[in-house]
Image (cartoon, rainbow, N blue to C red):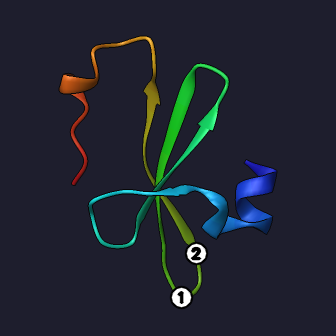
Amino acid sequence: MTLTAIFPEAGMQTEFDGIRIRVVKHFQLVYRITDVTIEVLTVWDSRQNPKKLKIK
């Protein structure tokens, strides 16, 4: 999470405006960058079926 705090725009852009994903081992950190914070939307275990992932 430290690298995400220092370089928040290093995460991959998604099809959703302003939402990024950063892969950390078997997990995907799904987050949104605001003017003053990094809002974590979900932490997803990448070993699951990706069709189950809901981002909103």
Q: CA distance from mark 2 to mark 1?
A: 6 Å
How many tags in the picture? 2
Image side of residue 28 versus residue 15, left or right: right
Image side of residue 6 versus residue 18, left or right: right
The residue shown at (25%, 32%) is: 53
Q: Is residue 17 above or below residue 14?
A: below
Q: Is residue 41 above or below residue 8?
A: above
The residue at which mark 1 appears reads as: 35
Q: Quadrant of the C terminus?
A: bottom left
SS assignment at label 1 = loop
Q: Position of residue 51 (x, y in %)?
A: 19, 25
Q: Position of residue 52 (x, y in %)?
A: 20, 24
SS assignment at label 2 = loop
Q: Is label 2 in contact with label 1 (beta carbons under 8 Å)?
A: yes
The residue at which mark 2 appears reads as: 37
The residue shown at (70%, 57%) is: 4
Q: Residues within 10 Å of mark 1 (few under 14, many from 20)?
A: few
